[in-house]
Amino acid sequence: MRDLLMLDLSFLDMIFIKWKKSYLSDSDKRKSRRTAEIITEDGKRENMKKHLKLCVISSIFFALLVYLIWGNTALTVSNIKISSSRIPIAFSGFRIAQVSDLHNAEFGKGNRKLLELLSESKPDIIAITGDLVDAGHTDIGVALDFAKEAVKIAPVYYVTGNHEASLSQYDELKIELKTIGVIVLEDEAVQLKYDTEEITLIGLSDPDFTIKGDIFGEVPAMVSTKLNNLADDENSYTILLSHRPELFESYVHCNIDLVLSGHAHGGQFRLPFIGGLIAPNQGLFPQYDAGLYTSGSTNMIVSRGLGNSIIPIRFNNRPEVVVIELLNMDC
């Protein structure tokens, strides 16, 4: 009987041990499952964070890309009024549309958008202040197609920029422009007449046609000499078309009333509260990059231009047409 009882107890112990092992094993499995679930949830959270960061970065990059494309193709008009008692009364309200630094760019097929904008501005004349073409990727056909339509809007006056000075086809371009009806001014002065009154319009060829690189700083004196010979009527209100804004002191010295210039491309990258970052012949943080500058009786308007050249993009610097309205202060 005792042996039977001991056998039963041993049997019960075996069952209990097996149950305990089984229970502990199940408990471990449950713990493992809970641990795995926690790890899985943490992994999901990390993945969600990564996806969210990627979405934010992608959205910022996409928005920046759209802004860059828009900022390089969306034309704008800058309206500037110039008042002076020297402006003849007959020319009060006279409007000049300034086109600068096109560099073979096209805004719409055949520059349709640019031409529409010019037409809507209702200019009395259109002034092209250099770099109509780009020496690096020249297609004079684009320039000529634009000029053919521009002369239908208003008389077109044109001066060269540094890119024309580097262009092997410049003579061909000049002949074709004249044939179309564009008035090409190469160190020349013409009189614009309205009723019985007139103003003087001077056009300077780019200095690179004469002195390439200007290592010895001869250009300012050369430009002053030209202007003194061309602006010989002190009583006439004088407008100068000249590609180079960095020669402002020479223009002031020669008592030019109004200068229309370009070349600086608005400083290419315009920084808030600072202005342009870099410009040809002026370097970093150029002094004359965009807008109106005044010294004494001389006003100079620097167009931000339309196209790009060596640096292929602009930032915060939309391509512009400048529309200038002359006003007699006594009217």
Image (cartoon, grey):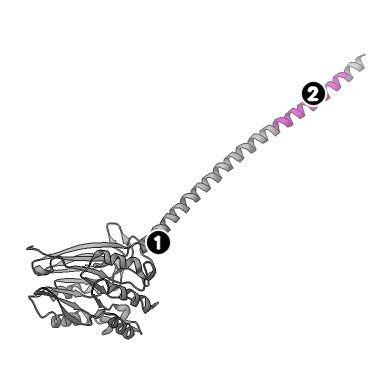
Picture quadrant of residue 17: top right
Q: Which residues are magenta?
A: 8-28
Q: Is residue 32 above or below residue 214?
A: above
**Image quarter hosting the C terminus:** bottom left
The one of 264 and 249 positioned closer to us in this rendering: 264
The nearer-to-camera label among 2 and 1 is 1
Counting from the top left corner in percent of width and height, residue 201 is at: 17, 76
Specify the amino acid type for callout 2. Phe
Is there any visible trace of residue 15 in the rendered image? Answer: yes
Residue 5 part of the magenta-drawn span:
no
Q: Position of residue 197 (x, y in %)?
A: 9, 74
Is residue 227 shown above or below 72? below
Residue, disc 2? 16
Q: Secondary structure at mark 2?
A: helix
Residue at the image point whose x is 82% and y is 24% from the top: 15
Image spot of residue 252 (x, y percent): 15, 73
- SS at mark 1 in the image: helix
Q: Earlier in the sequence, mark 2 or mark 1?
A: 2
Q: Residue visible at 29% across and 73% down?
A: 150
- Horizontally, residue 68 falls left or right of residue 180, namely right
What residue did someone put label 1 on?
69
- Side (left or right) of 203 relative to 164: left
Disc 1 marks which amino acid? Answer: Ile
In this view, the residue farthest toward the top is: 1
User: Within 10 Å of the Cα at label 2, are there few (<14), some (14-19), or many (20+) other Cα atoms?
Assistant: few
Tell me residue 22's x, y (percent).
76, 29
Q: Is residue 231 rendered to the left or right of residue 75?
A: left
